Image (spheres, coloured by chain):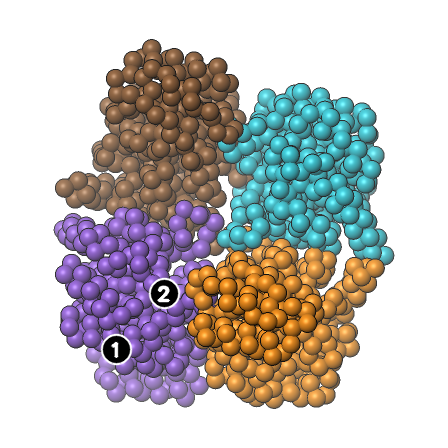
Chain colours: A purple, B brown, C cyan, D orange
Amino acid sequence: MLVVMKNDATEEQVQAVIQEIEKLGYRGIPMPGAQRTAVCIIGNRGPVEDAQLLAMDGVKETITVTKPYKLVSRETQPEPTVISIGDITIGAGEPVIMAGPCAVESEEQALTIASVVKEHGARVYRGGAFKPRTSPYSFQGLGERGLKILAKVRQETGLLIVTEATDHANLEIVEKYADIIQIGARNMQNYSLLRLAGQVSKPILLKRGFAATIDELLMAAEYIMSEGNTRIILCERGIRTFADNTRNTLDLSAILSIKEASHLPIIVDPSHAAGRREYVIPLSKGAIAVGADGLLVEVHHDPPHALSDGMQSLYPQQFGELMKEVDRLKNQLKD
Amino acid sequence: MLVVMKNDATEEQVQAVIQEIEKLGYRGIPMPGAQRTAVCIIGNRGPVEDAQLLAMDGVKETITVTKPYKLVSRETQPEPTVISIGDITIGAGEPVIMAGPCAVESEEQALTIASVVKEHGARVYRGGAFKPRTSPYSFQGLGERGLKILAKVRQETGLLIVTEATDHANLEIVEKYADIIQIGARNMQNYSLLRLAGQVSKPILLKRGFAATIDELLMAAEYIMSEGNTRIILCERGIRTFADNTRNTLDLSAILSIKEASHLPIIVDPSHAAGRREYVIPLSKGAIAVGADGLLVEVHHDPPHALSDGMQSLYPQQFGELMKEVDRLKNQLKD
Amino acid sequence: MLVVMKNDATEEQVQAVIQEIEKLGYRGIPMPGAQRTAVCIIGNRGPVEDAQLLAMDGVKETITVTKPYKLVSRETQPEPTVISIGDITIGAGEPVIMAGPCAVESEEQALTIASVVKEHGARVYRGGAFKPRTSPYSFQGLGERGLKILAKVRQETGLLIVTEATDHANLEIVEKYADIIQIGARNMQNYSLLRLAGQVSKPILLKRGFAATIDELLMAAEYIMSEGNTRIILCERGIRTFADNTRNTLDLSAILSIKEASHLPIIVDPSHAAGRREYVIPLSKGAIAVGADGLLVEVHHDPPHALSDGMQSLYPQQFGELMKEVDRLKNQLKD
Amino acid sequence: MLVVMKNDATEEQVQAVIQEIEKLGYRGIPMPGAQRTAVCIIGNRGPVEDAQLLAMDGVKETITVTKPYKLVSRETQPEPTVISIGDITIGAGEPVIMAGPCAVESEEQALTIASVVKEHGARVYRGGAFKPRTSPYSFQGLGERGLKILAKVRQETGLLIVTEATDHANLEIVEKYADIIQIGARNMQNYSLLRLAGQVSKPILLKRGFAATIDELLMAAEYIMSEGNTRIILCERGIRTFADNTRNTLDLSAILSIKEASHLPIIVDPSHAAGRREYVIPLSKGAIAVGADGLLVEVHHDPPHALSDGMQSLYPQQFGELMKEVDRLKNQLKD
């Protein structure tokens, strides 16, 4: 349930409502908005008796939230969430491009690719230091050494850094180095990790599990937000279907369903969905045209020798072409 | 196998090659192209002994076709097929918009909607006279009376007509009235119907079955083309997956896989994929941005009272908005 | 809606109800049962006003059918349908084994395999004369010559014959030769063919489309039954999923869902689901244990040289083993 | 690669081979078998030069392992793994029944259900203390208090205990109380948790992710085994498909594919797959008939008031019926 405050409600009135909610045995989370402040009640299993709340000073009305998720719901917060990190904003209309290699392999490799993606206009650098790999015998990433390289990339290029955390231990380390912390598709229902991600100081990039429904993705985001971290970026990266022409089937309608149900921004990863670099540019254009808030793209200076997933990494020149296409498209869409 | 003729090969030399192929017990289909003529050998189950063919006058080389489909393959014909119908062309770069109601309900309804879609710039009118319905008790279409109404729409508006045939009997009738004959998703593997569609004089719009792979769709097109009808337009309309946020999951990467494997044009039906009108405009933009050769869209002057699928039909005003968006996008993409 | 007659209602009273229903603009189909006769109203799109019907002589009550299918529904007929063909019954508790090659290749091949399957106790012989094939260049079956061979198999062995029809033309021919007419998975939503199947004199074996829900399968059966043919055997043959360890994923819970929703018998085809002969025996045991009314199994005397699908055909000895396992299992289940 | 030792190879020779492998920069894991001892080489990314190894005393041959998984592969260990826990064995032919509530709710509830499942012959008690729940606001289990109740169940009934761990912290606690530690479907690719599960002293019950292929499940098991824990029981619990008649589609062919590719035992959870108690008995029979090594079944003394998933829990009487059916079936299958 949502307790909507009057426009002129004071901070004291909001706090009084939160205390009243706690007396009822639940938690009250303030949701400040451009138009109004509301207090979202969580922790209740059934309907909440609202007579007492409605009688309080500053309370305008109560609204029942019809979805299983609450804090991430559009019902709770009608305006889209805009996330500011450094000098960029995500969810404000301008698509944000995050690009870089699948894995950090060496300082030289990381810096080489960073200069490529920066030159072409990307603002965020992606690169894995802790890699969740299907085989225990595959390269698992450079670990903290990789994070230090990423920190150097930021220092030398000014690019913001997004990199994945896969468990409690490395989430705490990643928090120190990254600007955005990625929770990967395989961990989308690792609720223990999600809770911890809700307690860190950095924004979270949460990827849709490859067999997750939109509701399940939003419930995963709710886990994070219920712990206090409201800066969450969702990411569509393809779903598992019978279709065998791409590694996964990119579900661009997910952008629409998420924007309808939630106020959170949503970006698209065409590289992992397609699994083939030839498809990355047109699918990126499709994602922007449908309304994605950004892209997460794999780029490598030497794809055939990339430590993993070389088949899907763009060559530098292709990334340049991608950025030009995105620019043209977004200007067109803005008009 | 493909027998590629020299640039200056004569028609007689081509005919001689075809006769030689027939002597070997196969069929030879001439594939004239901008750059070269080739003769495609079909009917063989294994490799063909090509020594004799290579020795013939006018023969440049032979190429083994690696895909199970041959006539529809890019290997056989590298240039894209452009289909001219009346004064429009499909596959030539300019996306073609086909729009209209799910079903023809009455002359008045059909003409009302036709004037809407024409006013906003559509060139092809869609409307079902023979409807394949999940329930035997649902409205099955007006039949030939519906076709006559469609003929009147063409006469009064100049719009071309696309409408579905569902069996041998009505395919023969539809051929008389329609400019493009649709074979629906449920009949994509109705091989008997596909063969007959290969023998008619009108272009075929072949929709992807909702659980068909790209290879299966192209094999279905191969059935049609092996009977002589080379004018085939493919259509992506969503696939069946676990995802429950849309009726089917629109697979825009299918556009890329089809264009890679085949020379046939491919359009997109966002209405049936999404099942909700709110999604049709953004998904249409996505389809055009990815590279679709056209759109097939449901429009109704009074969606809540449409005889079927009213939930997904656009209102006239929405269709106008769609056309504006498509125009802007295609101008941008052309630059 | 279902008009349930009193136990002592006369045939005249039933006819009067049917005539009354027709006056209302619908059709009335009598559904005789062990306990009661009911008249099922079809053709209505919404609720039927039942006051007049309830007032008629012999009428006990009316029941609203909650499912989109009516005639095939358990609500309409609570007792399971038992289909008698020659001296066998399907749906009466004893699983019926149908076995034979994918395709009839020659008289010698057909008779060789027939003697194998008969020797081991099968009662129905399967073999395709009209084969729906993904490629137009693949072997499409021997056609009517194949049917004549099947007729000879019946004559020489006493086995009943089940074989597939794929269109109107061959359905009429198949009807002359077969004891059971198969409608294949690819034609499960070929409504024109289903309607014709509802008008023939032979029982129909209707295979589940590889991406069809249970409701869609039952709606397809409803098409057949609404035309008058009540002898329908359903067949689960695997569904298309992401899983790549078998050709299709055998959905044995379909047996339960079908028996819950419908009175029709349901058999299982483990050969097409698995695509590998090693899996056929254990999956057959699973199917019988779950409650299937029979099996449809591919057997060939020389699988490596079978004209199609040799990989999944059982060797004669394996079929013998299968029959022994089924016998033990069904005795155990009967106790 | 597998280094197969001669039948009379000494322990010293095996150790020498392991040391030689370590010199090459890899790890060597001894795989003792009934027929032979082999040393599995892990950690290599490409082919291993085997000349030196073949020249060593006691070495019979080397075998290349063709699958991405090694330690769990049948190629590495041809005999099935039999896991002994207390006085039961899993994988030895006799199916093991694990039964109990979804969640431990109270001591009284747990003991009541325990006496039911024990009375009917189950040997292992299941019950969740740490529940991975889709919503952060749902009941998350009693935690360590629940584990203490489970310990009491074991003490009072002699039943072995299987219960789930969802992260590093609770895995260490669960290890103290449980006889078998469950890793749930949502954590099947939580590699960090899998590694830790490889280091504990208790057997692991690893459930198949609802969108995991067989290869992915075996790779997850490989993570566990590569850390030293060889006692792994796999569990099929239904996969996510388009089919809507059950919560998930139970893939009984997974039993066959796993037994073909791996030596590990595999049990089946029909309750979570079906989501409906009416289907649990027949699907259990199907699972046993196909060859499952056991069942994991939800039972509750009062399903309508169960704290979660009451719809799928068996009533005590139904569980009695299930056990009778399983007994009859396994006697029949043993003959």
As shown in the figure, which amino acid type bears the numbered disc 2? Lys
Which residue is rendered at x = 23% and y = 83% of the image? A10
Specify the subunit that label 2 lies on: A
User: Does the CB distance between marks 1 and 2 fall below 8 Å?
Assistant: no
Q: Judge from the rendering whether residue B38 lies leftward or rightward of residue D90; answer left or right.
A: left
Can residue B185 be seen here?
Answer: no
Estimate the spatial distance between the alpha carbons at disc 1 and disc 2, rounded to whole Å: 24 Å
**Residue at the outermost top position:** B12
Number of labels in the image equals 2
Task: Indicate the quadrant where residue A100 lies.
Answer: bottom left
Task: Answer with the quarter of the image where residue D147 lies.
Answer: bottom right
Left or right: where does residue C77 sit relative to residue B321?
right
Q: Position of residue C230 (x, y in %)?
A: 70, 35
Q: Considering the numbered disc 2 on the image, is that residue within a helix, a strand or a loop? A: strand
Asked if C323 appears above or below D307 in the picture, the reply is above
Point out the image quarter for the N terminus of chain C.
Answer: top right
Residue C269 drawn at (x, y percent): 66, 44
**Camera-side residue: D285 or A253?**
D285
Q: Residues within 10 Å of mark 1 (few under 14, many from 20)?
A: some
- Indicate the quadrant where residue B329 lies: top left
Which residue: 77% across, 37% down? C117
- Residue annotated with mark 1: A148
